[in-house]
Image: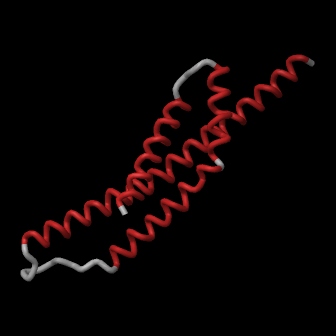
Amino acid sequence: MALQWMILTYLVAAEAVIAVLLTLPSPKLLKDRLVSLISLLLQPALFIVPFAGFQLLDIYWKMEHRLMCTGETCTAAERDRYEKSIYKSQRNVILCISACLLYWCVYRVCKFHKEIQSLEEVEKRYKEQ
């Protein structure tokens, strides 16, 4: 199980770096090439969304079938273990949601950049006429 969360963590970190690179000001030629490269990578990277969704379903299922540790019958170690698992679940939910949100942000930035390029080309054609 830990391997899945490690993979998702690295994917979220990579998405965050890509989002920062796309939003930083840079020369037009560099920005155009970067956006075209990332646009090519977006379609195969779409697996992030169902992967994160599957992980969310896994967390939900485990949450529903988890033994509750409330009351006087639990020892301190059992209560700590229960609370630690709750915190891990919350962290993993945030990780899954951020993976989907960052993918959507990178997709929208690339799409906006392409729309701006097409509008600049139309404007350039109108000026030439």
Q: Where, by quadrant of the figure, is residue 84 drawn?
A: bottom left
- For the N terminus, give its image quadrant: bottom left
Q: Position of residue 92 (x, y in %)?
A: 36, 58
Could you say where residue 29 lies in the image, as x and y percent from the top left? 67, 20
Give coordinates of residue 115: x percent, y percent. Answer: 72, 36
Residue 116 x %, y %:
71, 31
The image quadrant where one finds the C terminus is top right
Whether residue 10 is situated above or below residue 30 in the rendered picture: below
- Pick whichever, 30 or 5, lies toward us: 5
Q: Residue furthest front?
A: 3
Which residue ends up furthest to the bottom in the rendered image? Answer: 73
Left or right side of 17 for 59: left
> In the image, is residue 34 above or below residue 1?
above
Q: Residue furthest right?
A: 129
Residue sitting nearer the eye, 46 or 93: 46
The vertical placement of 43 against 64, above or below, is above
Give the residue at x 32% y 63%.
89
**Residue at 55%, 22% in the rendered image:** 25
Q: How is the image coloured?
A: secondary structure
| Number of marks present in the image shown | 0
Name the foreground residue: 119 vs 64.
64
Question: Is residue 23 toward the left or the right of residue 81 in the image?
Answer: right
Which residue lies at the image location 87% right of the left edge and 23% below the top edge? 125
- Relative horizontal placement of residue 20, taking residue 68 as reference (left or right): right
**Residue, x 42% and y 70% (percent of image)?**
58
